[in-house]
Image (spheres, helix red, strand yellow):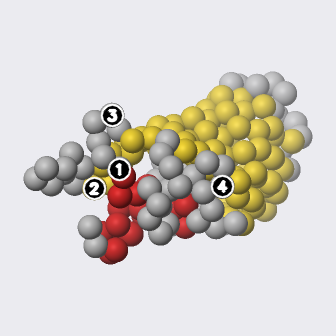
Amino acid sequence: MTRTALATALAALATGCWFPSEPGDARLPGEELGTYAVVGTLDPGTCGAGALGAPAVWRFEVRLSRDASSLYWLNGEAPIEGTVGADGAFEIVSETRVGVLEPERDQPGCGVIRRDRAAGRLDGAALDVPSFAGELRYEYASVPGSDCSALVGADGGFERLPCALGFALSATRVRAPGDGDAR
């Protein structure tokens, strides 16, 4: 496998529903809470330092909204729904399968299951949330029957599979609902 093909394959794992994309005009369900500037501090976990090019500090913006028991996270694509309790504790989970390496003659190819989980606590009253804190965790595992050995030990790859890495999150509201740029 060429270095370019491997780099492309690894990039496919690092993108998706949690990584911010260009802001879109997607609508949030429920009552909007605002736009938050988020700072994530990397915990390389069992994937190893440098896995998938994950930065030591990650900064991005996210829009949040909620209804009675659901929290919606929007990073420019479609909102991702999770749960939120009366005490502000939240959890959002998603899972995706990524075809990383195409099968070749005698190789089964590599597919990876990526499970994303954000959990934490909203600070403030139900609809007046000035900040939140928590963790965003990514878990990676090979799809049964696939061969992902090319990703293990490779530059920007994994130290091992399955593995997990995470970010400790701290967020502050930078735009309240109805303020300025209501993307």
Numbered mark located on residue 44 in the image: 4
Callout 2 secondary element:
strand
Badge 2: few (under 14), some or many (20 or more) residues near its Cα, within 10 Å? many
The residue most toward the left is 105
Q: Is residue 130 visible?
A: yes
Q: Amino acid at mark 3?
A: Pro
Looking at the picture, how far across and down is residue 168, in whole percent?
75, 51
Q: Amino acid at mark 1?
A: Cys
Q: Residue at x 80, y 54 (%)?
A: 170
Determine whether label 2 and label 3 are within 8 Å by CB: no
> What residue does disc 3 label?
144
> What residue does disc 1 label?
148
Q: Residue at x 81, y 40 (%)?
A: 122
Nearest the camera: 81 or 156?
Answer: 156
Nearest the camera: 117 or 60?
Answer: 117
Q: Earlier in the sequence, mark 4 or mark 2?
A: 4
Nearest the camera: 98 or 91?
Answer: 98
